[in-house]
Structure formats: C-alpha cells, structure tokens
Amino acid sequence: MNALTLKIDTYKMAQILKSKGFTKEQTDGIIEVAREIDMESIVTRDYLDTKLTLLEQRLTIRLGSMIMALGAILVAIKYLG
C-alpha cells in the first residue's frame, strides 16, 4: 500500500472541539492522537475495491471448476453407472 499523508488543520480542529465544550486538555489530547495516526493501517476504498475484485475473480474460477467437475461426474455416472 502506498504511504499516505493525513493533513490536519489542528487550529481549526481545536476551535471546533473547544466550541463543542471540550477542555483544553481534552482538545490537546485528541489532536495529539490525530497526529499519531498510523496511515499504513488505514484501509482505503481503492484498496478494498481491488481486493474485492480479486476475490470475485477467484470465486468465479472456483465455482466454474466445481460446475465442470459436477458435469464430469454426472457424465461418468450416466455412461459408467
């Protein structure tokens, strides 16, 4: 996954938090946590879309193989049974 950068306007964030009734200590703590977010552990929509597409392809191939195997078994039963 590509390195991502999260840009946070900490001043605006502090103003919003304070206007919502957070204390200075609470606001400082929240901003500190926001700065330390590990962007490598965040899953993006593009990443999920790619993984879901690959999973869909694998399941389609597997289902097709199972259908072909079932067909072969039915033919074998018809002619050998």
Image (spheres, grey):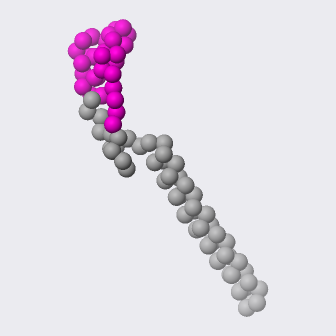
Where residue 62 appears, as percent x and y from the top left, is 58, 68
Looking at this view, name the residue that lies furthest to the right. 78
* Magenta-drawn segment: 5-34
Q: Is residue 59 magenta?
A: no
Q: Is residue 22 visible?
A: yes
Where residue 12 appears, as percent x and y from the top left, is 34, 16
Q: In terms of image quadrants, where is residue 75?
A: bottom right
Q: Residue at x 33, y 37 (%)?
A: 5
Which is more toward the observer, 51 or 46? 46
Where residue 44 appears, as percent x and y from the top left, is 44, 42
Q: Main secondary structure of the magenta part?
A: helix
Q: Residue at x 30, y 28 (%)?
A: 34
Work out whether 18 lies above or below 47. Answer: above
Locate the C terminus by quadrant.
bottom right
Q: In terms of image quadrants, where is residue 36?
A: top left
Q: How many labels sit on residues?
A: 0
Q: Is residue 21 magenta?
A: yes
Where residue 60 appears, as percent x and y from the top left, is 61, 63
Q: Is residue 17 visible?
A: no
Q: Residue at x 34, y 29 (%)?
A: 7
Which is more toward the observer, 72 or 26? 26
Work out whether 8 lies above or below 67. Answer: above
Work out whether 67 lies above or below 81. Answer: above
In the image, taking residue 78 as reference, residue 31 lies left or right, namely: left
